[in-house]
Image (tube, grey):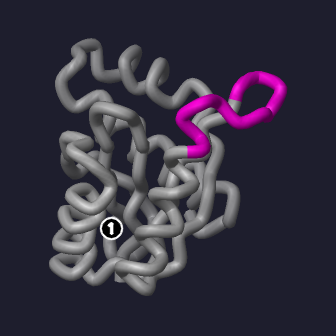
Amino acid sequence: MRYLGIDYGEKNIGIALTDNALRMAFPHSTIKNKGADYAAGEIKKICEKNEVARIVLGKSVNYKNEDNPVAGEAGGFKRLLEKTLNIPVLYQSEILTTKEAGRIQGKKEGIHASAAALILRSYLERKNVV
């Protein structure tokens, strides 16, 4: 059993996975956002292949903890995933994760998957799973 993390963006969607013990989060891949149905289909394949039991979706908020413009689109995507996959989808704040991933990564390639891993790691720590 694994958890899957998502860094949702208008152009790219970063994907991360935990190990089977739910102790660590690793960048997995980046999906081009060619529409919600396409992205949900790609995520479904990853979930089935990796026996994913829970999805953690980054919630895009500003410094006042208010939704950013992309949050509305991500909310619709969350509902689609829940309906399509029948897997619980939970929110985790993603404030500054892309910036931090860029600092750690040092290059643009893979930054969204790294941000998804940071989101997933934050969730694991918050829930004391780690």
| Image location (x, y in percent) of residue 15 | 30, 51
- Displayed quadrant of residue 13: top left
Point out residue 75 in the picture as x, y percentages from the top left corner. Answer: 57, 54
Task: Tell which of 64 and 107 is nearer to you.
Answer: 64
Give the residue displayed 29% in from the left and 64% down from the top. Answer: 40
| 22 relative to 109, above or below | below
Q: Nearer the viewer, residue 87 or 50?
A: 87
> Can you identify the residue that label 1 sits on?
19
Residue 117 versus residue 40: which sits nearer the camera?
A: 40
- Residue in the image at 59% along x and 69% along y: 129
What is the secondary structure assignment of the residue under circle 1?
loop
Q: What is the span of residues highlighted in magenta in the rendered image? A: 62-72
Instruction: State the residue at coordinates (59%, 65%).
Output: 90
Amino acid marked by disc 1: Asp
Q: Is residue 6 left or right of residue 46?
A: right
Q: Is residue 79 magenta?
A: no
- The quadrant of the rendering that contains the C terminus is bottom right
**Among the 4 quarters of the image, the one containing residue 114:** top left
What main secondary structure does the magenta stretch of the protein show?
loop
* Residue 81: x %, y % from top left: 42, 70
- Find residue 34 and report its image quarter: top left
Q: Position of residue 60 (x, y in %)?
A: 60, 37
Residue extending furthest toward the right: 64
